[in-house]
Amino acid sequence: MNVADSQRVASALERLGYDATARAENADVIVLNTCVVRQSAEDKAHGRLSSLQPLKEKNPELVINLMGCMVGVKGSGEMQKVYPFVDVFSPPSDPQPLLDHLRSAEAQELTLHETEERFAVMDGDLLLPREARGNLVSAFVPIVYGCSHACSYCVIPFRRGAEQSRSIGTITQEVRALVDQGVREVTLLGQIVDRYGLDIENGPNLSDLLRVLHEIDGLDRIRFLTSHPNWMTDELLHTVAELPKVCEHIEVPVQAGDDQVLERMKRGYSVDAYRRLIDRIRVIIPGVSIATDIIVGFPGETRAQFQETYDLLAELKLDVAHLARYSPRPQTVSSRKMEDSISDDEKMRRFRLLEELQAGIAAEINATYHNKVVEVLVEEMHKTRWKGRTRTNKLVFFESSQDMRGQTVDVLIDWTGPWSMVGTPVDKTAYPSGDQPTLAAWGPLQ
């Protein structure tokens, strides 16, 4: 979400005549877009912001804009006291306060019409920053802002506000604009993306949106994240299975493998319900890859309860597990009513156990791709090799002297590891339909 927000700010600034610079010392405007979902992210933001103060003291004309979840949707009174050298405080996903500040500085030199035209932010009218235009293959598109579910550990509802779905028309307009600028894949974003449209009376749902976006010419792939088990309906799963452009990859966090922990987290489902959901996903979408999120060290989590999480992950054998150590966040139920009694060392021990387990699971799953041809959408050059992803979101590297950016390439996998795979591009058209390729049969694509 922050990547998408930052691109929108950069685009708005470029429309005003600003150019990007790699060095903060050379900037006229600095935007620090922040995340506070974990304590480590907030600490990093505070450190970076403090490092900008000397630049402001040296150049009083420098405009510093603090944006995102550190500011939140309820105002910046406290932040202004802590950081008086910051000129503008912007809520998440909203570049308008910065543009208003810059407009006030330039208003004397512009007519009212020129001011409104230059400083307006049109939702859906997204022009990518210059460096991304024609080079960005995969883009993030927010479709739901905020969240109204309020898990007991999550600060997002307090910082990004209540759930708010964008209209299908606005989203479609933005995706078309992205495709016109070279984007071939979009990932639809929401804190709970499968709740899209539920805040609108008689509104559309995510399946409706996927079907509309599927008709956009030039768009090759569609993904979405992150889902919640309670709203992952069979209708949505069948839509994923039916639409060729929608990738066979589902992100659906479990967070814990013990019912009591899930209840304290206010997740709203049981372990068995999650287990049945994984079964349904695999039946409805053959060949699907599934990613999950897990928090270790939640207040009151016993070693036995952690073992339940470990055993569930070992049982389900999911493709990816995003792991986090619990850290209390201000205003949340868990920070106000639950003691963070588990030591950092114990949290790290549990984290490492799951990390090692998941590395083995991922290596085992990825090994099944060895000697097989996969379809890879090439994103960029990484060092000396091209980098891209399969439809199931597997990271693949390969070498080629051709410019492969934005192309869909068939790659024969000849090495696999837990986090990535390496292969050789091949030409499928050289082989009769129905032939089963082997490592010896496929030739390299020069």
Image (tube, rainbow, N blue to C red):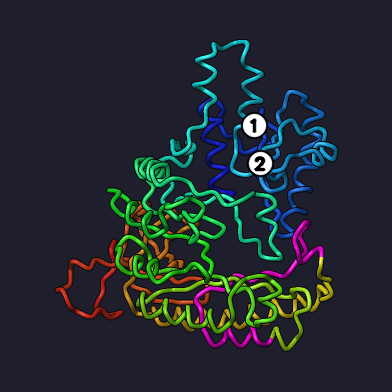
**Residue at the image position 68 percent from the left and 36 percent from the top:** 24
Residue 283: which disc? Answer: none
- Structural crowding at the residue carrying mark 2, measured as other residues with C-alpha within 10 Å and reported as few (<14), some (14–19) or many (≥20): many
**Residue at the image position 76 percent from the left and 66 percent from the top:** 334
Q: Position of residue 193 (x, y in %)?
A: 50, 59
Residue 97: which disc? Answer: 1
Using the rendered view, name the quadrant where residue 23 is placed.
top right
The answer to whether marks 1 and 2 mark residues whose Cβ atoms lie closer than 8 Å is yes
Q: Quadrant of the C terminus?
A: bottom left
According to the image, label 2 marks what residue?
91
- Structural crowding at the residue carrying mark 1, measured as other residues with C-alpha within 10 Å and reported as few (<14), some (14–19) or many (≥20): some
User: Is 50 located above or below residue 157 in the figure?
Assistant: above
Using the rendered view, name the quadrant where residue 38 is placed.
bottom right
Query: What type is the residue that disc 2 sits on?
Result: Pro
Callout 1: SS? helix
**Residue at the image position 63 percent from the left and 26 percent from the top:** 100
- In the displayed structure, does residue 383 sit left or right of residue 311? left
Query: What type is the residue that disc 1 sits on?
Result: Pro
